[in-house]
Amino acid sequence: MTTLIIAPPPTPNGDLHVGHLAGPYLAGDVYARMLRGEGQGVLYATGTDDSQTYVVTSAAKLNLTPEALCAQAARDIQDTLKLTGVQVDGFAPFDERYRATVLAFLTPLFEQGRFEWRTVTFPYDPVRQEFLVEGLVGGTCPVCLSGSRGGLCEACGHPNNFMELLDPVSTLHPRHPVEGREARILVFPLERYRAQLEAYYARQEGRWRPHILQLVRELLAAPLPDFPVTYPVTWGIPSPYPGTEGQVLNAWVEGMPASMYCSATAGEAGGLSPEQAAALWEDPQARLVYFLGFDNSYFWGVVHLALLMAHGGRFVLPDVIVPNEFYELEHEKFSTSRGHLIWARDLTRDVPRDLARYYLALTCPEHHRTNFSRSALEKLTRERLLDPWAGLQRHFVPDGTGPLPVTPAGQDAARRMAERLRACYALETFSLTRLADTLTQHLQRLHREADEARAQGHAPSGDLWHQLRVLLHLASPLLIDATASLLLDQQQPWTALLDESSVTPFALPPLVPEPALA
């Protein structure tokens, strides 16, 4: 069985910031590394979402063409993923094959009448004679009354298609008047899929994080809105369907085929033929997992899901969607467009990336907004990771003796520890915060027990060495550099270690050079 992991392609309107990293990209990386460590098949993939209108608004502010911004941002994002240790199996280019994959997914739905025509009213700038959609328009969310852009409110997660924003304003030309103007477009009627969506989500109750389930309940409490398939704007993939001349595909309708293309790219990179890679999402044995920001939940958890359902069982449906809330900087949301951010690459240049990954895991916004603080990073990584690690270095020192015996009691302790850590990786209980916290607890416990043994004139026993070895294997998806420098056997899954009857002491390296946080 192959697990297909998708972190939604980021909008290439800039590099990845720390909020991105603390959200889906680190989570997807840790989960993928855990599966690889257990010997399971996994493909973790992403790309860039070039069709988003946010590219247009960001490029205008930077005095660049949208095409130039996309090209530069795509390079930066790939470099940043590598710098931060996010190991994707494939990073899909936005190319002709991408466009062909999108159309191959959508065209059968058009031909089968799954899309319908609607005449709808959009915000319109009469000065520039332009329709305003998605990132081109701002206003007030009609559901929660927060400030919002077009298409979706990031605060409450509800859609606001067409002319639903209160007090709409052009984001590029805020002094221009905005009026309503009609356009005939293709839409995807979500209400058709109500019964399938309700049955699907009834099966997820109690398995997924509660906020996304709350959003879906709210959405299903009223008629589901039509979802725009085409827009009367110029940035995006030109719509090929008769009657939509001069329109483009809604960037959000690309989400599912874009993800399929990302997976196919990863599969081909791993040695699959193009045909095998293209069929990954049609394998009934495959497991599909999304890691994403809560603000994307409506698109991925309703629209994209219904689009998959519209193909009549051809494609696998997501097994789990793991959303995260917003990560804040100085108690305000990270924002590329407002320049309120810390670039992820800058953080890992300033701070050893194992420490950065540990702190972001410890403080990641799993169920509510959390805050990044450089002073907290230095304090918490010192107290909870560096100090206990240094203590272990003092006590766990190989003296050249041969393998040490591991007793049944030592095996049992390692197994109990492993069960608690493994629960942090399981999708239904996935938690980077608890992973980092549980890791700290056992580092401190082993330090304490080794310290007690030294006080009695004994070196750490084989039982303690065995537990340390198991702990480091289970920490390896998060602490990638420290554990990579250990000569641990990566040719077998970590579960094989649990039954070891002996263990050879090994050198525990420094987690980071001591001056790193000075």
Image: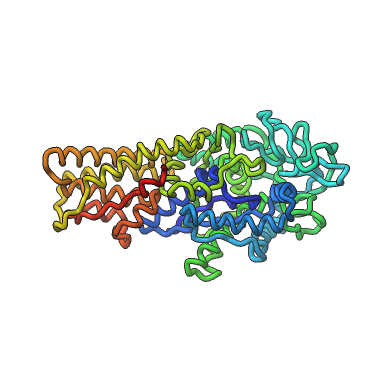
Relative to the observer, which residue lies in front, 62 or 274?
Answer: 62
- Relative vertical location of residue 261 with respect to residue 415 in this rendering, above or below: below
Q: Choose top left, top right, bottom left or bottom right for residue 94.
A: bottom right
Left or right side of 499 for 363: right
Question: Residue 437, how many percent across, how many down?
Answer: 37, 38
Question: Residue 122, how many percent across, how many down?
Answer: 80, 41
Relative to the observer, which residue lies in front, 180 or 108?
Answer: 180
User: In the image, what residue occupies the spot 23% across and 45% down?
Assistant: 394
User: In the image, what residue occupies the spot 75% across and 44% down?
Assistant: 136
Q: How many marks?
A: 0
Q: Tell me the quarter of the image containing the C terminus.
A: top left
Left or right side of 69 for 513: left
Left or right side of 62 for 84: left
Question: Residue 69, how many percent across, how many down?
Answer: 68, 55
Residue 171 in view: yes
Q: Choose top left, top right, bottom left or bottom right for residue 51.
A: bottom right
- Relative vertical location of residue 428 with respect to residue 259 in this rendering, above or below: above
Q: Tell me the quarter of the image containing the N terminus.
A: bottom left
